[in-house]
């Protein structure tokens, strides 16, 4: 069987219990067709970048699925008819990651740009800069208008 990561967006009008009911409904579809659902992450209510079907927010949910393609196709078919589902995306993966996804990690847990090897630019200290003395630059002549 193939491994999939499936993310779907549910309308903002429904409650958290209804989102969990949707997850259980689609888990039942997968299991009825010979597959199984691994990790489920509810990412919560998030603001959308642009409106989708007049909604500005949506509940995001991630499901790790181990199932034949027929089971995933049936689940997606049922999602197309459900008015509470705004969008969904299923991606086939080589292996499931057991750690928390990037959406569930705290900001402090994520690697920062400055912590990366090399970074964008080499780090310079103040002492590395060439010193400039006042005598290095020629003086600009003063004009009568400026005085």
Image (cartoon, grey):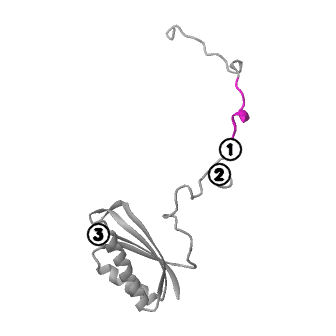
Alpha carbons under labels 2 and 1: distance apart: 9 Å
Coordinates of residue 69 in the picture (x, y in percent):
46, 87
**Furthest residue toward front:** 17
Residue 129, by quadrant, is top right
Looking at the image, tell me whether mark 2 or mark 3 is earlier in sequence order. Answer: 3
On residue 20, the disc is none
| Residue drawn 65% across the image and 55% down it | 116
Q: Nearer the viewer, residue 34 or 114?
A: 34
Element carrying mark 3: loop
Q: Are marks 3 and 1 in contact (CB under 8 Å)?
A: no
Magenta-span inclusion, residue 98: no
Across the whole image, how many numbered discs are drawn on residues?
3
Dot 1 falls on a residue whose secondary structure is loop
Residue 62 in picture, x, y percent from top left: 45, 73
Image position, residue 144 (x, y; %)? 52, 7
Q: Name the residue that disc number 3 marks.
A: 14
Q: Mark 3 or mark 1: which comes first in sequence?
A: 3
Classify 10 Å Cα crowding around label 2: few (below 14), some (14-19), many (20 and above): few
Q: For the stretch drawn in magenta, what is the main secondary structure?
A: loop
Q: Give whichever of 34, 49 is nearer the camera.
A: 34
Q: Are marks 2 and 1 in contact (CB under 8 Å)?
A: yes
What residue is drawn where x is 38% and y is 81%? 24
User: Whole-Å distance between the Cαs marked 3 and 1?
Assistant: 50 Å
Name the residue carrying label 2. Answer: 119
Q: What stretch of residues is rendered in magenta? A: 124-132
Q: Eyeballing the image, is 132 above or below 71?
A: above
Residue 123 is labelled as 1
Residue 13 horizontal/vertical position (percent) = 27, 66
Image quadrant where residue 96 sits: bottom right
Query: Helix, strand, or loop for circle 2?
Result: loop
């Amino acid at each position: 069987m193939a491994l999939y990561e499936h993310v779907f967006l549910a309308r903002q009008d429904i409650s958290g219990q209804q989102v969990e009911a949707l997850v259980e409904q689609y888990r039942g579809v997968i299991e009825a067709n010979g597959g199984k659902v691994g990790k489920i992450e509810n990412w919560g209510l998030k603001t959308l970048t642009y409106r989708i079907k007049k909604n500005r927010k949506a509940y995001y949910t991630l499901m790790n699925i181990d199932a034949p393609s027929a089971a995933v196709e049936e689940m997606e078919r049922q999602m197309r008819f459900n008015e509470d589902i705004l969008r969904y995306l299923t991606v086939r993966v080589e292996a499931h990651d057991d750690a928390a996804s990037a959406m569930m990690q705290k900001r402090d847990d994520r690697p920062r740009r400055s912590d990366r090897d090399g970074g964008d630019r080499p780090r310079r200290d103040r002492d590395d800069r060439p010193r400039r003395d006042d005598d290095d630059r020629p003086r600009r002549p003063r004009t009568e208008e400026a005085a």
